Amino acid sequence: MLEFLGDSVLDLLITWHLYQSHTYIDPGVLTDLCSASVNNDNFAQVVVRHNLHQHLLHSSGLLVSQITKYVKVISESNPKSLPSIIAPKVSFVDHSSLFFII
């Protein structure tokens, strides 16, 4: 239940931010940008790339194991950056305005 609520709040905040800051964007492009912004895979890659996973407070050995495996996979595969992933859909949006997502 809390995960659903958290996802909904995150989706609302990102949508509101993008809607307020990019009033000239077509609704379809805005929808694509919002979807890319709240995508768990994109979010996880950004978290790992900025080493934010090291600041998680938890007491789960399983979680540590899963995070360690994911970090290894990400570091070995050298995935695209978030701007590269969403650039084809929003190439006309200045990447500096995506600070809220990153």
Image (tube, helix red, strand yellow):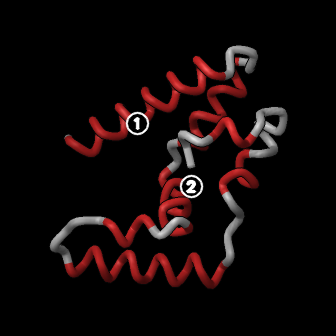
Which corner quadrant of the image does residue 76 belong to? bottom right
Viewed as shown, does residue 30 lie left or right of 11?
A: right
Amino acid type at mark 1: Leu
Q: Nearer the viewer, residue 29 or 84?
A: 84
Q: Residue furthest top?
A: 23
Classify mark 2: residues with Cα within 10 Å, few (<14), some (14-19) or many (20+): many
Residue 10 badge: 1
Name the residue rendered at 77%, 36% in the picture. 94
Residue 97 badge: none
Q: Quadrant of the N terminus?
A: top left
Kind of element beneath mark 2 = helix
Residue 90: x %, y % from top left: 77, 36
Classify mark 1: residues with Cα within 10 Å, few (<14), some (14-19) or many (20+): some
Name the residue rendered at 74%, 20% in the picture. 25
Q: Is residue 101 above or below residue 77?
A: above
Viewed as shown, does residue 58 lie left or right of 50?
A: left
Q: Is residue 49 above or below residue 10?
A: below
Could you tell me how far apart the alpha carbons at marks 1 and 2 are, in whole angstroms? 14 Å
Viewed as shown, does residue 97 lie left or right of 70?
A: right
Kind of element beneath mark 1 = helix
Residue, disc 2: 42
Residue 73: x %, y % from top left: 55, 81
Residue 3: x %, y % from top left: 27, 45
Q: Is residue 1 above or below residue 25?
A: below
